[in-house]
Image (spheres, rainbow, N blue to C red):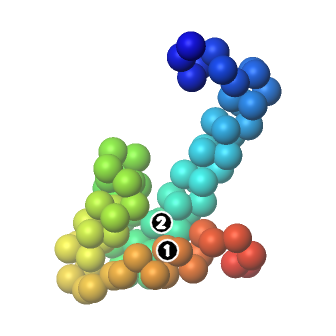
């Protein structure tokens, strides 16, 4: 049995919805970091969608000429961070 048929439809929807919410939170954090660094956020958000948060942060670091670590991203998207 493949995994697609093992979940009820509502469970599939919840998993997809949670994944989408997580991506949106990461995209917002990447956008905010880009603005703080004074670089346009579009390329970093595209890189986030293509290759993930580490690649997006690496691109921001190159564009800004600074060393942006993953810690600020974790702090911004972790539960309870307001």
Q: Residue at x 57, y 80 (%)?
A: 75
Instruction: Report how many numbered discs are placed on residues in the image.
Output: 2
Instruction: Give the structural element (helix, strand or loop) at label 2.
Output: helix
Residue under label 2: 31
Look at the image and tell me in which quarter the C terminus lies.
bottom right
Q: Is residue 77 visible?
A: yes
The spot of residue 60 in percent (x, y) is: 30, 71
Residue under label 1: 73
Instruction: Report the disc number at residue 43.
Output: none
User: Residue at the bottom extreme?
Assistant: 66
**For residue 49, above or below residue 72:** above
**For residue 71, above or below residue 10:** below
**For residue 66, above or below residue 21:** below
Q: Please rate how many residues cluster around mark 1, counting C-alpha atoms within 10 Å: few if below 14, some from 14 to 19, many from 20.
A: many
The spot of residue 8 in percent (x, y) is: 76, 22
The spot of residue 34 in percent (x, y) is: 40, 72
Look at the image and tell me in which quarter the N terminus lies.
top right
For marks 2 and 1 on the same chain, the one whose residue lies earlier in the sequence: 2
Q: Residue at x 70, y 70 (%)?
A: 79
Q: Choose mark 2 or mark 1, whichever is in front.
A: 1
Disc 2 + disc 1, Cβ < 8 Å: no
Q: Residue at x 63, y 15 (%)?
A: 5
Q: Please rate how many residues cluster around mark 2, counting C-alpha atoms within 10 Å: few if below 14, some from 14 to 19, many from 20.
A: many
Near-viewer residue (62 or 7): 7
């Amino acid at each position: 049995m493949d995994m697609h048929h093992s979940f009820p439809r509502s469970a599939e929807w919840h998993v997809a919805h949670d994944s989408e919410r997580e991506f949106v939170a990461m995209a917002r954090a990447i956008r905010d970091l880009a603005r703080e660094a004074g670089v346009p956020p579009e390329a970093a958000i595209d890189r986030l969608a293509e290759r993930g948060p580490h690649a997006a942060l690496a691109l921001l670091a190159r564009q800004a000429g600074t060393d942006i670590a993953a810690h600020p991203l974790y702090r911004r998207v972790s539960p309870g961070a307001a």
